Amino acid sequence: MRSPSRLVPAPPTDERAPALCLSALSKRFGHKLAVDQVDLVVPRGSFYGLVGPNGAGKTTLLSMAVGLLRPTAGTARIFGADVWADPTRAKALVGVLPDGMSLPERLTGRELLTYQGLLRGLSRPEVDARTTELLDVLELTEANRTLVIDYSTGMRKKIGLATALLHAPRLLVLDEPFEAVDPVSAATIRTILNRFVVGGGSVIFSSHVMALVEQLCDHVAVIAAGRVAAAGPVEEVRGGRGLEEVFVELVGARTGGAEGLAWLAS
Amino acid sequence: MAGVLIQMKLAVLRRSMTGQRAASMIAGGAIGLALAIGTLLLAFGHFQNEDAAVAFLALVMLVWAIGWLFGPMLTGGDATLRLEYFSLVSIRPRQLATGLFAAGFIGIPPVVGLVACAILPAYGARLGLYAGLIGIPAALLMLLFLVLLSKVGIQALGRLTQSRLGWELSSLVVGFVLGAQNTGWMDIPLLVRVLSGKWAAQAGTALKILPSSWPVLAVDAAARSQWGRVAETLGGLAVVCAALFVAYALLLGRHLVRGTASGRTAVRAPSGPGLVDRVAPDTRFGAVFGKELRMWGRDLRRARFLSMALWGGVFTGVLPLLDGHVVILPFVGITTALFAGALASNVYGLDAGALWLTLVTPAAERVDVRARQLAFALVVGVPTLLLTVVLIPVSGQNWAWPWLLAALPALVGASSGLVPLVSLIGVAPFADRPGGSPMDGFTDESSDQVRVKIFGMLFGQILLAAPALALVLAGTLTHRTALSVAGVLVGVATGVGLGWLFGWLARRRLEKAGPEILDLMRKGVRGPVTDAPTEAEEAAGAMPSRVAQEMSGARTALVALLVMCGILFTIPQGLVALILTVLNAKVPGWFVAAHVPHAFGPLVALASVVVGACAWTGVVTINLAHNRRQRELAHSPDGLERRDGDLDDEGVTASR
């Protein structure tokens, strides 16, 4: 599967290290702690869901985990490789889909993947083969000649996922991968991720859809106000109840919308 | 409706009157007001006879009309109230046009326009009471005309830019203005001859036909008590204004339905492997190199920069030809390169948040910077070299060979490194949006940053070519060819060396501060105020206080002052004076260099360049210090320097 190119990593040396290990990770913006001393371990081969209300710090946490945002304190390790001290090794092992990502808008999907693949050190035939397969599986073949700038939100998500998968990483860090994706494509993405996990890969993704997390994940962490409110195997966190119920209880939220707005129906 | 829009605009302006944005507005307003007061004073000038006065004032009004028509196309116009805001409001286009038109009278430009138009009553008052009184409605109508002209102009340009041809035309206009600024003054004698020689009568008649001259004619007619003429001219101008307003409402109506953004982008990727695939090797370097080559062709903004630079260069060389000067023609290539380097100085900003792709790829920074450099050097270097090599023999200016062969490689090489480096300092993101207009990125906080960069680059590039040029100068003065040849070699060496050095610095910056740069690219220069908050920002709640992010008023004013001094000392008093004195041309009286003994002329001009350079250094230093503080506030303790300063303390210090 792997090409012998120099930038594609050898299997990690530390065989016991978890796929992702965040210790005491903090991020301060001005006076506000967005992420406060978060410890999180994503075991190898796990399908990890990260849930939390809007503004809980999920995106900040995931950005720090992959080297896109410098933490104020704490460390992030991918298969034992420190993201900030040994970025080259860590980055080779991880595939990333950031939230609200920009892309080189004036490339076609194929050109974008080819460019990323070559930049990752894959050989041209390998890049071409993988690109064709990814575009095919993600149903983006039709959009072969369309520039990314003309893609729909769902298509952007899928081409972003393709760039994350292209170099056959060991860990996928995906921020809201199912957001704005149609049900058919979502099913495709679920199947791809499931196969990836079955094949020994690890996934951590953030989502607002509890049902999806319950269905897909074996582990879950609930983040609220920059802290981990609960984390562990899904069954353990649920404690026999529905995840949504536990979530609402943990984040201490109350559902609004029942009062006011009298003028709306008049 | 008009009231609501005026309130909205006032609110936006109030929000904008802080920091760099305010500095830029104040500087622009000050320059405009100075010009307007200068215009007003012309009313008290001495004219040979009344006909000459009318012709002169009509010409002045024409210049203002041209300024109002094309000015917004250069600066991006007034984007405080964007059309998109109103596309879902149930409102008739004419109503909206009325509102936007009324709001168009709010702000600094209308005040500037009014002061300039006051020349009409001022001149009229010299002729008599009635002429003075007629001057008042004439001035108001003229202001109406100017505001409408700019509104229609920018809307028409918006229509135009929905096609590639339109983009090209708009760059041609910008190029013409750039060229006219550079060498247009060489045609002034021609203009004087046309206006005073055997063509004078025709030129005068042609001028009188233009609506911009009609208020002047009205004042003149009032002085002669030709009331029918007064009614004709003012009534005519009112009709023209009404027609412009109808046109404006029509254009607005179309935009509201179709949106300013056309659905599809103008460019579509070819199906098979193109030229780029054949040029770019299948390596990591080749990947970025190929992508960059494609971007220079496909990204309309980049393509527009290149064509603006090219047209600017072409007009710089060609405009003097009108009056028979071929001496500038060989400089078309190097002027193009100069503008291209300056305009491209935000190349990373154009990719905005897409920088994450580079950051998640292991050790991609070096490749990314170096490949961008080569792509830039190729895209700009090859055509400008060709232009130079062809135009020197064509113009017969063979003396220019060593000068240009020394300066061009130095300039292109250095700017290939400066372009990525400068774009990573003082980050100014401009996301590429579907159906984006060429005006994107000329009207917000980022654009102020970019304007500073463009000016800085213009002078920086010239200074970096100086060592090579000094050798050629020595060779020319001492008539030693060897020295000139050495100059060419030094030019090539400086180009390669500086390109490598600046590229290395850019790479270092990207490696060390990549995440911080990405953060700014995503949030914008003043993200917390302008953009919808992202999750991270929502989580952050109170971002570093806005006050802390902005420069203090005094510092802002200092920057504005330094920029003005920088422009004044480096370009007119410095470089232009230097060229004039070296070429033994007649130096106009307002050059300081004209007032010293001839031999000292070049020295005075050089000293002026140095003073200007100091001013620019000051601007850059202040800006850098400000940016650093901003970064430290947002990400303290900053990973760059890992300072453990107390954040609250720093915030308080910065906001004081």
Image: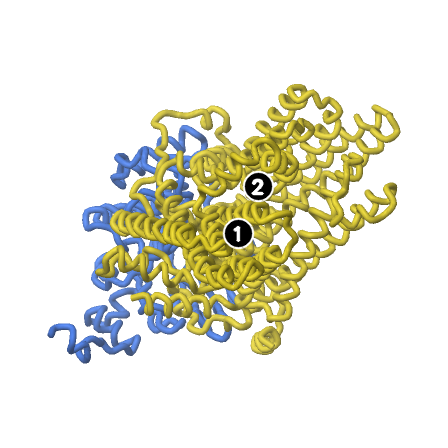
| Whether marks 1 and 2 lie on the same chain | no
Inspect this view and state whether residue B2 appears: yes
Q: The chain coloured blue carries which letter?
A: A
The x, y position of residue B155, in whole percent, is 37, 48
Give me the disc on residue A87. 1
Q: Is residue B293 left or right of residue A146?
A: right
Q: Quadrant of residue A150?
A: top left
Task: Please give the name of the residue rendered at 27% of the width and 35% of the height, measured from the top-left corner.
Answer: A141
Give neighbour class at mark 1: few <14, some 14-19, many 20+ (Cα, 10 Å): many
Query: To which chain does the residue with label 1 belong?
Result: A
Residue at position x 49%, y 62% from top? B130
Residue labelled with disc 2: B178
* Quarter containing the C terminus of chain B: bottom right
Name the secondary structure under disc 1. helix
Mark 2 belongs to which amino acid?
Leu
Label 2 marks which chain's residue?
A: B
Residue drawn at 33 percent across, 71 percent down? A230
In the image, is B57 to the left or to the right of B141?
right
Label pair 1/2, CB-CB below 8 angstroms: no
Q: Which mark is residue A226?
A: none
Which residue is more in the foreground, B53 or B87?
B53
Separation (CA) of disc 1 from disc 2:
46 Å
| Chain letter, colour yellow in render | B
Type of amino acid at the residue the image marks with label 1: Pro
Judged by depth in the image, the label closer to the viewer, 1 or 2, is 2
Q: Residue furthest front?
A: B225
